[in-house]
Image (cartoon, rainbow, N blue to C red):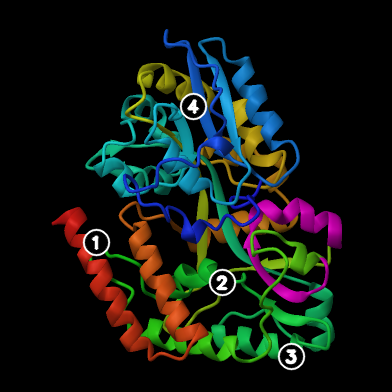
Amino acid sequence: MSALSNRNFDRRTALRAALGLAAAGGLAACGSNTGRSSSGDSLVQMFHAYGEAGTEQAIKRYAKAYKGANVTTQWITSNDFESKLFSALLTKNAPDLFEFHPQIQMVKSGQVADLTDIVDPVKDDFNPADIKSHTVDGKIYGVRMIDDPQFFFYRKSMLEKAGVEVPTTLDELMEAAAKLTTGKVKGLYMGNDLHAVINPMIWSAGADTLNEKNEIAYHTDGVVEGIKKMRKLFTSGDLLLGAPTDYWDPSALNQGLCAIQFCGMWAMPQIQDALGDDWGVFPFPKTVDSGKQSVYNGGWSMFVNAKSKNVDAAKEFVKWLWIDQKKYQEDWATSYGFHIPPRTSLAKTATKLKSGNAAEGVKLFNEFGHFDNIGWTQAMITALEDVFADSVRKDMDPEKALAKADAAINRELKKLFG
């Protein structure tokens, strides 16, 4: 049940269609026959298509067990879930509730309902970082369903054969990639567009996207140095580019196309099936000596459409499923792919995460984890993706590329925070 398991759905490019500006239409894939009645006893929820077998059936099974309303699920299999979602939200066929990631523009535009009243009583049982990443002005918007740490997976036998130690710095990762590259195998795979590693590279340089005051925090000497290293890696011939599937799918590692791959904890059962015990995990290494290893914690959350005619009924269902039904929450987190339950009580008892690489993944999550910043918007994400396009794929001076991003991001910050 990967966080990004829709075939080309990339977390880092989520919300390409900025809220309120999404093109109307494109609804055929959403299914317009929702079975909704005007009496308020029917609800529609929207999910992106997770890759792991059984996920669609599980979500529909949970919904069927709910007696408070007739809940229909729109399971979006196309590769642009976010634009389908935001197009749908502009129409009368909008879902009553939907999964997404915390983004402040959804709050500022009044698109998502305040869920403080249902989360507050159990707030202390949620990972505090998940509460913080869904909170604006003291109100909680959204209920986290799963946490998805992302790190590097490696083939133990390949590293052993090449005499390579597990890298702890970006320089060591680059050296490892060179030594591990042979005729048919590339040393390293970080996704086809490299977007998934932008934030980890920043955090591992000891920087951040924004600081506590919602000011730019990524434009540092360490990040500039990191961009230069990524450019070197990109042009080295040691990086797998143009793989058949993107980083969220472990196929590149499983099929021997690379020795090290950036991916998510969700892929662990698939990797175990393919490779047995011939694999391990490590966090994004230190970009510069003064930095610290990092792990990006993605994931998905449930939101209620504040413009729905059934807000109260939708909140009741969210409370029933994602707050009260711990059995379903654990099933969703551990039965299809591996995810960390955001509820502390469930995370403690999730037996499948207690041993081997899963336990190591949980340890890395706790030690090095960084969560979504609700103030970091799609326009900001895109601005840093442009930096990578200009300076890593092409050869633009990183200082110039970052200055261009600064201008775009400061405009956004001014709009959002004054």
Looking at the picture, which amino acid does disc 4 mark?
Ile
- The question of residue 251 being in magenta is answered with no
- Toward the viewer: 270 or 311? 311
| Spatial CA span between label 2 and label 4 | 36 Å
Q: Which residues are magenta?
A: 255-275
Quadrant of residue 92 within the rendered picture: top left
Q: Of tags 2 and 3, which is closer to the observer?
A: 2
| Spatial CA span between label 1 and label 3 | 43 Å
Looking at the picture, which amino acid does disc 3 mark?
Lys
**Mark 3, residues whose alpha carbon is within 10 Å: few (<14), some, or many (≥20)?**
some
Looking at the picture, which amino acid does disc 1 mark?
Glu
Q: Which mark is first along the chain, 3 or 2? A: 3
Q: Which disc is residue 323 wearing?
A: 4
Question: Mark 2: which secondary structure?
Answer: loop
Q: Which mark is first along the chain, 4 or 2? A: 2
The residue wearing badge 3 is 179
59 displayed left or right of 370:
right
Question: Mark 4: which secondary structure?
Answer: helix
| Whole-percent x, y for residue 73 in the image | 58, 27
- Toward the viewer: 265 or 85? 85
Please, which residue is most extreme toward the left here? 418
**Mark 1, residues whose alpha carbon is within 10 Å: few (<14), some, or many (≥20)?**
some
The residue wearing badge 1 is 412
